[in-house]
Image: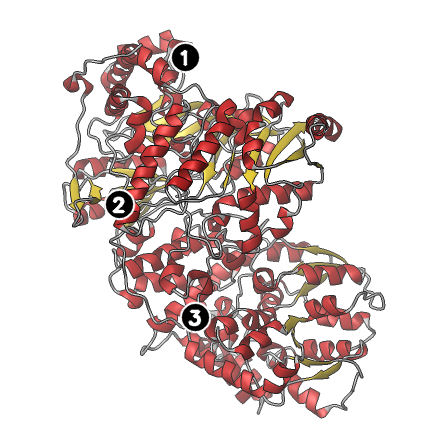
Amino acid sequence: MSHVIEVDHARAGIRRPVRRIERGGNGRVRSAFVPTDGSVKELAAALRSTIEGEVRFDDGSRALYATDASNYRQVPIGVVIPRSVDDVVAAMAICRKSGAPMVMRGGGTSLAGQGCNVAVLIDFSKYLNRIVALDPERRLARVEPGCVLDTLRSAAEQHHLTFGPDPATHDHNTLGGMLGNNSCGVHSIMSGRTSDNVEALEILTYDGMRLKVGRTDDAEFRRILAAGGRAGEIYLQLDDFRHRYEGLIRERYPKIPRRVSGYENLDQLFAENGFNVARALVGTESTCVTILEATLELIASPPERVLAVIGFKDVFEAADAVPQVLPFNPIACEGMDDMLVEFVVRKGVHREDAELVPEGKGWLIAEFGADTRDEAEAAARRLLDAFERKGNPVELVADKRRQAKIWELREAALGVTAHVPDWPEGGPGWEDSAVHRDNLGRYLRDLKALFHRHGYEASVYGHFGDGLIHCRIDFDLRTEKGLVNFNAFMRDAADLVVRYGGTLSGEHGDGQARAELLEKMYGPEMIQAFREFKAIWDPAGMMNPGKVVDPYPITSNLRSGPEFHPEEVDAYFAYPEDGGSFLSATRRCVGVGSCRRTDSDKSVMCPSYMATREEQYSTRGRARLLFEMMREGPITDGWKSRAVEQALDLCLGCKGCKSDCPVNTDMATYKAEFRAHHYRGRLRPRAAYSMGLIERWSKLAQRAPWLINALTHAPGISTAAKWVGGIAPERSIPAYARHSFSEWFRRRMRVRGGGSRVMLWPDTFNNYFRPATAIAATELLESLGFDVVIPHRHLCCGRPLYDWGMLDQAKALWLEVMTSLEQEIASGTPLIGLEPACVSAFRDELLGLFPTDDRARRLSAQTFLLTEFLDRNLETLQDLRVDGQALVQIHCHHHAVIKPDAEIRVLKKIGLAHEVMKSGCCGMAGSFGFEAAKYEVSMAAAERVLLPAVRAAPADVMILANGFSCREQIEQGTGRKTLHVAELLATGAGKRIVL
């Protein structure tokens, strides 16, 4: 049955704001946006004088929020960070008066462009992020829009409850964003979409009406109409709308569980669904109303879970098998292909996780939950037995650690498939289509064939239990020819999914990426219905204009389209993963937002964001600013940009992002690169010279260390010394040792171990400040039979120089190292380091600065951290036994570059009971925590987990920390003594180190 709807535009109140269109030379729309009527300066001034929150209309803030996780970029008019709901209401009123469009932002992880617009952007995540109330008996939770999903889930789990929808970004995405996009996630076959779990919403319209919406029974409906006003007008229009469009909605809505495209929940207005206005608004992508608070339904969370993993000949057969899996009642059913596993191996991330799946080239991962482990395993075994009888390789995964590893593998897919070595860059666009589960295998085969017809290839994975496919396709968006092909593919793909009765989007929404194609899916009458529904709530058309309804063209407003062609720069570092291009490196971040995690349970990244909750101090925020600097968007002063310097200044250089970021964004290197250019020909801050040149001052101090110590610790003089050096007055300046390690080594009676020759690296910190560590290492290695030598002259890797971009000096130091150690390099003598930050310099910066120097490659390969060397060269350490317990702080560079596995194995071999603290970065980070301007952030990072854990530890528990910075932070912050692992092992070998 077809429907023809007569539309009274006056009654619908439809207004389409005037758009400004910019076209390229070939006529393609390059950008489209709704301009602001009034003065932007007056708008900013009015906001600042009215709201309590933060108003940021500076170029840096606008650049920071110019894109989300999509292909699109639209620089906002300005950014508002409200402290209260009243701030949001006031900001809306001021924007309405100024004729300014508005867009709402949560975690900024939207993949379809709905999180960016030429509008006033409201960021809810910094302050409006609370759980307002949690009622376990009624299984309800009230939350603010900026509340992170896992914050709610953790609180609910205390009552064996959870919020069902759980996207892969669950530890940093916000519930407001989930409500906007109608997110789903892994467990949607158990819990449905976000819209299926909403009880009520408190909303705000552009014209200023606040309203609580939810189910509407007849009595409530009559009460609203009787009260009149704007609410009565809206409900009267909604009632008219649902009756006029009911037949069309029933006909045109796909009958699948993952319908998320368009305004997908208008059927919630029907009587059988309780005239549920709240659920009808979920998934409207900030185009209709602003959500101020949400009341969400919670579900039981099975306390015991196991995984059943099934291997198949290919991913198509895995998809075919979904209808056979679902009758066994799993609570999740995920699929992935062999390309994903290949990409994981190529990138070297989660490589051990990939080995956990059974043989095959396509897999289904089914999760079973129950009250007891036996029940969960029995349910999983029934499924596995059924498929094992068919000849499929299967694996039951009951161990929680192994389960977590498999989920890490699956959740890493988005980042892993974005940047793969020797593979074109993958991106979103058609990353979220869904069909009925029964059609998944056939659709997937046709989709792959369509990829190939357009010259594309992609790994496919996703929520197979709900018929949803995720992928990142190697689109060419940088050339006009590539855009023609991209545009044609998108239209062909839309036709394909519609033929299968599917949806363009199964959880990410449409935004700008797919909204232009909605007419293919729904037909023109349904598109008109969407237009009218929006007009009921937003008659002025100023809520996130150009997204979903009357959308901007798919090929406009591109972040890196054909018009993006900034000049390459002559960089210091090599950037081999980015084709030798710093410009490409600034494009590496894809906006996933993993750097916005608020805990360090699984990673180090990003300590400055954890301490400040500021987007500009996240890895993503800094990457965005560097990109905008190269693009010359709102940031026009290039390398001299104060906005970029300000953001990078609070980067601790921990390198956490190098390992923890899904796309391995290396912000510590980008910071060093930027500062080398930024400060060229300019003076740096005082701390750069007092601490960045610590190696130089330490050499001089050895002439009279007692005098330097007296001056830096004497009352009055110490205060002045700290001020001159830019050091925080709260800090204690580390004291120099009476004798350096090198001095001790050369004066002592030489001991020849008779075994293999090794060179111990006397880094600046363990040489001049803590020589007992290096002495312990020497005694230990010699007791194990090694012939220990040190360089014949003072050498340095220049670690403190990188933070300040003193790269010319760093390169000069490296040349000295390679020249002085040429014979040792040639003979393959292992170089053993004690300071993780210095060992990481050999592994990382050395190769980055000298990519073609064979000496650099060989020296890097033969450099080891002490425990790494012991683990590789000694089968057992049974002669070294250490009784007792220890808390272990892993240095950030150890985590990110060296990896702590060897150290943990050594601690196990010596029989030490130990706990590795999930504390992330200690916050000292070389000179960072000593600097006056950064002391508060440094301490905030330390007080988050590390220092409280150390203070709470019993007095007989040892505190192990290898990094000089970690040791200083712990000792200055708690008064507890720390041990380097070399000192611990020397004790185990019966050595007593005395200076």
Residue at label 1? Answer: 274
Vertical side of 710 occupied by 588: above or below = above
Mark 2 and mark 1 in contact (Cβ < 8 Å)? Answer: no
Residue at label 2? Answer: 557
Direction from residue 429 to residue 956 in the image, left or right = right
Q: Which of marks 3 and 1 is nearer the N terminus?
A: 1
Q: What residue type is labelled 1?
A: Gly
Residue found 69% across the figure and 36% down from its top: 393
**Residue 367: where, in percent of width, then height?**
63, 31
Q: Distance between the residues labelled 3 and 1?
A: 61 Å
**Residue 387: where, in percent of width, then height?**
68, 28
Q: Which amino acid does label 3 sit on?
A: Phe
**Residue 815: where, in percent of width, then height?**
50, 83
Near mark 3 (Cα within 10 A), the count class, few <14, some 14-19 or many ≥20, is many
- The quarter of the displayed image where residue 84 is located: top left
Badge 2 marks a residue whose secondary structure is loop
Vertical side of 825 occupied by 285: above or below = above
> In front: mark 3 or mark 1?
3
Q: Distance between the residues labelled 2 and 3?
A: 31 Å
Near mark 1 (Cα within 10 A), the count class, few <14, some 14-19 or many ≥20, is some
Direction from residue 376 to residue 220 in the image, left or right = left
Q: Earlier in the sequence, mark 2 or mark 3?
A: 2
- The quarter of the displayed image where residue 977 is located: bottom right
Direction from residue 755 to residue 250 in the image, left or right = left
